[in-house]
Structures are given as C-alpha cells and as structure tokens.
Image (cartoon, rainbow, N blue to C red):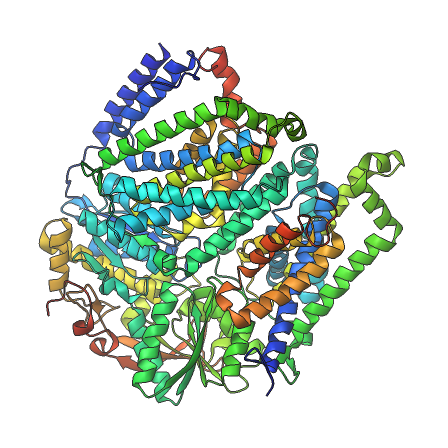
Amino acid sequence: MTLSPSVPSRQKPFILALIGLGLVLPFAVYPVFLMKGLCFGLFAAAFNLLLGYVGLLSFGHAMFFGWSAYLTAYAAKEWGLTPEIAILLGVALATVLGAVVGWLAIRRQGIYFAMITLALAQLGFFVAVQAPMTHGEDGIQGVPRGHLFGLFDLSDTMTMYYFVLAVFVASLLFLHRVVNSPFGQVLKAIRDNEPRAVSLGYEVGRYKLIAFVLSSAFAGLAGSLKSLVFQLASLADVSWHMSGEVVLMTLLGGVGTVLGPMVGAFLVVAIQDFFAGIGSWVIIIQGVIFVVCVLLFRSGMIGVLAPWLKRRGITG
Amino acid sequence: MMTILGIPTQALFGQLLLGLINGAFYAMLSLGLALIFGLLNIINFSHGALYMMGAFVAWLALNFLGLGYWPALIVAPLVVALVGIIIERTMLCRLYKLDHLYGLLLTFGLALIIEGLFREGYGVSGQPYSVPKELAGGWNLGFMFLPIYRGWVVVASLVLCLGTWYAIEKTKLGAYLRAGTENPTLVQAFGINVPLMITLTYGFGVALAAIAGVLAAPIYQVSPKMGSDLIIVVFAVVVIGGMGSILGSIVTGYMLGLVEGLTKVFYPEAASTVIFMVMVVVLLIKPAGLFGKGA
Amino acid sequence: MVMKRLLLGAAALALSTGMAHAQYSDGKVKIGVLTDLSGTYSDLAGKGTIVAAQMAIDDFGGKLNGQTIELISADHQNKADIASGIARKWYDTEQVDVIAELVTTAAAIAVREVSKEKGKVDLVSGAASTPLTNDKCSATGFHWTYDTYAMAVGTGDAVVKSGGKTWFFLTADYAFGHNLQAQTERVVKANGGTVKGAVKHPFPNSDFSSFLLQAQASGAQIIGLANAGADTINAIKQAKEFGITQAGQSLAGLLVFITDVHSLGLENAQGMMLTTGFYWDMDDQTRAWSKRWSEKMGGGKMPSMVHAGTYSQVLHYLKSTAAAKTDEGIKVADEMRKLPIADFFAKNGKIRADGRMVHDMYLAQVKKPSESKGPWDYYKIVRTIPGDEAYQPLAESTCPLVKK
C-alpha cells in the first residue's frame, strides 16, 4: 500500500504502526467490538470533515448513516446482492440524500444550519417509521453478510474484520488526503473567514456542498458497513440520538484532527460496552463527558495529546 | 351535521382546542428558551430536563413534604431557578465568548445527566400526580367535554406568556434587558450589572420551564423522559418563531399546537413530524424565522 | 522505533489475553438475562427478572455438573441493535449458554437471529408478538409467558361476549401494536362484533386526548388499547379526564400488567377486564413464591407475569440441561420439549414444535377500591382459559418446524 504523497514522511511510521496495530488487535480484543469502533470511527471522521474543516455542525447525520444501513441491509437480504454491491448502493443513496440536504442546508449558517439538518433528518426518521421496507421498530434483521466479490466468506468474523479494517484505512487515508489538498485548504479558509474566501473569488457554496456530500457519503459507508457487521439495520441508526452521539465522539476525540474522531468513537463505544449492565449510568457518564469536554478540553483528547506527541516527533 | 373536508365540525373544534392546550406548553417552554437565547446566546438544551425537574419537584414535595399543587406552583420554579443559577454561575458563564455550539453541547450534556439521575432514582414508568380538587371535573362545551384542568392550563399559560411579554416590552427592567441583548458592553457602561441580569434571566427562563412542568404533572405522568420527548419539538418552535424573538416564540408555540392538532385529525401518524416539515418550509422561505430579524 | 515498540506491545497483549479467551466447552452453565433495565418496560420486567432468574438457580441447587451456575445481565434499552450486539458478545466471549427474558419484540427477534446462528437457546418471557413462534421461530427458541394471540382470545372474547360488539382501536404505531390489533380484530369479528375504525399513534406518546376524541366520535362501544406500558396508562387516565368512560364507552386494555394497574391506581383501573398468565394471589404456591420475590426486591412490590415466567423458564432450562447431560443448545432444546412443566407458574405446561410454551391463562377483572383488602390486592380471576384455547392452534402456525 502506498501512502498518499501529502502525508509528511514523519507521520508515515506512526500511521504504519496504527495499521499494524489494527492488524494484530483482533487476536487480543473481541473483533466485533473493534468493528463497531471502526464503523463509528469512520462515521465520526466523516462528520468531522464538515465540523472540523468547514465549521458546519450538522445535527442530522444519522439520516445518511441510517438510510445507507437500511438500503444495504435490504439489498443484501431481499435482493440477495453481494456485499460490495449492497454497500455501493447504500453509499449512493447517502450521496444523493447528502446532495439534497446539503443543497438546502448550506444556505444557512451556525445554529440554523444545525436546525435545518435536524429537521430534515427528522423527516428521514418519519419515513423510516412509516415505510414498510424498514420493518419499523423491529428493523431489518438477519441480514446475510454474503461473499465479498463472490470469493471471501464474510460470515467468518476475522474475514469481516479485515474487510472493515481495509475500508476504514482506505477511507481515512482518502479523507486525510482531502483535507490536506488545495481543496481542503479552501475549506479551512472558509471556516476561518468566509467573507475573505468569497472576496478571493472562491465559490464558497460549491465548496461547502462538495464537502457536505463527501461527508454524507462516508457517513453512509459507515452505516452500510455497520449493517453488515451487526446484520441489522434499525430505527436507532436514523434517530436524532445517533446524530448527537457522533457529535459526542468527535468532540471527545478532538474536532478538526484526523485521529481524534476515531479515538472518540472507540472511547464512546467502549463506555457503552463496559457500562451496558448498569442501566441509566451510561447516560449520566456520557453527559459528564460532554460537560467536562466543553469546559476543560475543548480540543478533545487528541488536541490535548497532540503537543505531547509532537514533542516526541510522532506527528507533524 | 356540518363537515369540513369530511370531518365533522364538532370534532374539528375539539381537536383545535386540544391543539391549543398543547400549544400552551410549547409557548411556555419556547418563551424561556427564547429569553435565554436572546440574552445569553445559549441554546439551552437542558430546558426539557429542567421542565421535567419542575414536575418532579412538585411530586417530591407532595410525597415527602405534603405540599400540594398550589404551593408546588411556587416552590418548584424557585428550586429549579436556583439549580439554573448554579449551572449558569459555575458553567455557562465560561462559554459566552465562544461559539453558540459549545453552549448547546454543554447543556446537552447537562440534560443527559439530569435525566439519567432521575431515571436512576425513580425509574421511567412515571409517577402519578392527581388533578387538584378545585380543578377536577369538566365542562360540556357541546362540541366536546373540556376538563377544567386543561382549561386552566391554557389560561395560566396565556397569563404567564403575556405577562412576560409585557414586562419585557413595556417596563424599565425589560428595556435594560432588551438593551443588554443588543449591546451588553454599552449597558454595562451605564452602570447596570449585566452579569447579574444574565444570571437572573437564566433563572427566570428555567423557572418558566419548571412552572410548565408543574402544570403538566397532573396531565401526563411525572416521568424522567417527559422532557426529552418534548425538547426537540420546542426547539423547532423557537427556530420557526425566530431565535430570540419573544413574541415570535409565544405566537408560534400556540400556532404549532393548532397545526399539530389538525394533523392528528387528518394524518395522525405524522403528528410528531409535522412541526419539522413546517420548520423546513419556514427556514427556506424566511431564513430568520417568522418573527426574526436579519439572518 | 516507536512502531516496533507498539507492535511488540500489541503482540504481547495478544498473547496474554488470547489465552484467557481460548474457547472450550467447560461444562459450566452460564445464563444471561437481557432485559430493559432503564426504559418503559423496566418495571414490568427489568431488575425483577434478574432476581427471578437467580431464584430459579438457587431453587435448582445453584450447581450443575459440579460447577456453580453463573448469571449475568445487561440492559438492551428496548433497542434491537443493542440487544443483538450484547447477545453476540455474550455467546462469543462470555461463554453464555442461554439468554432469558427479552422484553420488547424487536429485541427478542434480534436475539433470536443471533441465537439461531450460534445454535444457542433463547427464552422469551416479556415480548408479546406472535411472529416469535411463527415465521421467526427456531429449534432452540422458546416463547414462555404470554403472547398477543392469548391476550386477544382472553380479553377480546370476554368483552365481545359481555356485549361490547363495536370496537375502535388506539394502536401503538409499531410492529407489536399492529400485531395486537390484528389479533384482537380477528377475535372480535369471529364473535360477531364489528370494527368501526382505528387510529395509529406515535410510540411512545404522552397525549392521547385527540385520539380519544376520534374514538369517541366513532361511537364505538369499546375503545381497544393496542399498546403497552406508559402508553396504556396515559390513555386510560386521559379517557377518564375527558369524560369518555363516564359517557358510556368502555376501554379494553389489550395488554395490561399488574405494574400498570399499580401505577394507575384502582380508582382509575377498576372494572377493567384483562388477560394474564399469572397472578400472585391465586394459591399458596404463588403467594409463597411472590412473597420471597418481594422480599428480595426490597419489599413493597409484587411480581408481574413476566417476572414469574422468567423464573419458570430458567428453572425448566436447568432441569432439561441436567437431564440432557450437556449444555449443547439443540440437545437441551429437544429435552425441554420432552419434559412437562409443572411449577407455581405453569401447572400443566408443555412446549410445542413451534417453541410456544402452552399453559393456562386467566381472565381477570380489576377490583373496585372497596373490594381491595390491601396493597396489590387488585384482581378477581373471572375465568381460567385452558392453554389449548388461549394459544394459536399449532395447525395455524407458519413456523417451518411444524410438520403438516
């Protein structure tokens, strides 16, 4: 695998080490847990493209995540399509939805942007509750994982894991590349000072829309993967709580960092996993994390750790 | 019998009146949110949780102190206002210089904590709270049977909302408040204690939520979930009305109650979604909301 | 350098924990109780089912094959995805042999799928919908306490026969509500009644007033509540508030638990007909068990049918495992179908090919406040419905395991 040229040479060993860790970890840690972390990590990374690099807080990303999950699950179960086609269909749906929602939402900023994405996502939720294909509260259950390219049997947990890992790594490298490209530079310029970007002659609207569509497509990819890993697509994936959860993950890990959302996602998934037996405390702990993050570590875990890592020459 | 679009007029009137009752709660809650947003620039996600807390304080006061409904109407808002003031002084006040979004995230976290604690303590199945004796029973209006208590809710909410609106628009204190919203530095320069005003506004805003909670207690179950079910809808109300607009939040609250009531007649499954449809349409046509100024 | 260290560390970690995770059948039995510990159904199921399962283990003797029987529990929050995730983890890494309770149909079906895949036994107590013994049935899956069919047969039949011929439904807008309405409609029509209409309300819902007014406008004699938990409670209270019951229409709660009656209060619930699989105050055995359960719960509560059913299913599972001399899912399941069930919950229970545990059900009427002698003295048992009448005939089941 060749890393994109935009990755500074100093970061290469660090990234390789992480990939190496990803390769051996399932021998030590329960692979399904890791896959969940990877799916949510990808979801958070996609979300972060918008919040961290364009400065737009979407409160409706569950719509892309959830609807891709539904379509992939439906395609794999009812139409018997192979997983790669089912996933592509899911991503295509998220892309289309992203284009529509983005086109409507990017005209607004700040809190209005957040609210219009929330409103549209609630409409998406409503359709999910009403449409017969989603099976309402039960969700689409017992989704077959199938054979990847007709060759690799994904019902084997390890095969599934390496497939998810490969998709995850490729997606993150791609997103990393995007934010470090000239396109990404323009996005950051818009985030930092939109009127200035406009006066420099950039069509700000188009940049925002492309970023929105990219973000929703990857959110959709994460949802599609999740529906295959858990063989299930349900209302939880399209509800506004899911939109809130991805904000929590990104905030906890560090907004505007490549690694942050992934770290945040793993932490949140681990908390949910660890405290599953004790009822309401999961919610309370999540709330405390929110409060502590906002008050003390607004730059998130990675934001706090970054200077330390930098001193040791690990990241650039 | 007369019908409108196939629905008997009597049934329609009944549904509209019910919509107005729901609208009364939306109006009280969105008024508090709008006040807080206007002065603090904070979108108070914990508003729903504090509304729930108001209902719980009433329930706890009844079951542990023997305080009935009428004292609870005074005690609950005071207790919740105190909690609100503590939240504002210890946490929110650190965020005023930052983006709105941090306030939203912090209060979202607080909402989770408050709701989680009550769930842990009292379960979710809901605690019963009886209608006060003075307001039991109902009137037969011809087109429907109106429980007296629900009528009282509409009246109480109208008095509260209009009173608040009057205080802000017509009194000197209100003038300071409006000036503080426009330009806090200048108001401070006139020797008015702006931080105190901010703290008290937050306290008052959440006290309104607590009163709404007490009013709701005899109608719905007193349950830790009652706030989170409502808050998203109330947000939509505030956004449609125009963030920070006092009159906008009141009028929109009642209006959307009516819209929801109508939806329940024609397409009940969509009742919980219709407000969001209205919101999308309004934001696309009038970006700052129905009563908002500028974008 | 850093990478090498990291890799070494990871490898060491892999080695050390890899040992602990080695899977071998240890002959030990581990029971998982997966329920709603924090949501709408946490009173009628929840913590009480964990206590009930532990009581079953204790009554069995606490040991099997010389090893202590273990119990773990978790909260599925009524969500299919969480339920499915926990079930998978339990089977994969915790050596759980059987998952019990499973309130909420969506969660039960999610666990059913995983259990089927892994060849493990699942015991459903709290969930209601009939698909669990129809198209979602499995060789290792069992449905224990009640289902929507039995509720409809009990309450629907009784109400129509006592003169409630015209119906209007308030239905929770999700699979369970639709299922319950459909089952009840069938019974109503079969008995010569008619259905005047139905309205689907969002789930969960707190304000029923407008739906109740529609029900009132329909002029039906009976307003059937095809919902559960807090929704049912709110609908009943608000019907009283709007003078609907006083004006002559009656409510029929199609799924009402004793915990619901408790939070409604007898004042609101009196006279209501309901169907239940268990009532604590039926005989000495039920009273003795319920008293023990109540003490373990800290007093002040009495068990619902879901609590009692969880005890019964766990005990039967343990007896069958001992008889089969293995914890292998399919063999235990076969043994479970062979053994009859006779405990305080099910006096003459038997398990059919589709996984349905057939036992007698009871038609109860809620007492008037003046008839109640003390706390939790709520029901008059009006009729015992024989199991074969209460549950869907095997011939009608769409379960592929049923040989026709």
Q: Nearer the viewer, residue C184 or A124?
A: A124
User: Can residue B270 be seen from the camera position used here?
Assistant: yes
Q: Is residue C221 above or below residue B167?
A: below
Estimate the x, y position of residue B45 in percent, counting from the top left.
61, 47
- Horizontal arrangement in the rendering, residue A272 relative to residue B182 (left or right): left
- Horizontal arrangement in the rendering, residue C173 relative to residue C360 (left or right): right
Report the residue at 63% width, 83% height from top.
B143
- Horizontal arrangement in the rendering, residue B189 relative to residue A220 (left or right): right
Estimate the x, y position of residue B276 in percent, counting from the top left.
56, 56
Report the residue at 58% width, 78% height from top.
C242
Give the total of numbered labels.
0
Report the residue at 38% width, 42% height from top.
A92
Q: Is residue C265 above or below residue B72?
A: below
Q: Quadrant of the C terminus of chain C?
A: bottom left
Residue furthest toward the bottom?
A: C163
Quarter-wise, where is residue C21 in the image? top left
Q: Is residue B41 above or below residue A141?
A: above
User: Can residue C296 be seen from the camera position used here?
Assistant: no
Q: Is residue C217 above or below residue B212?
A: below
Estimate the x, y position of residue C331 in percent, counting from the top left.
11, 53
Q: Quadrant of the N terminus of chain C?
A: top left
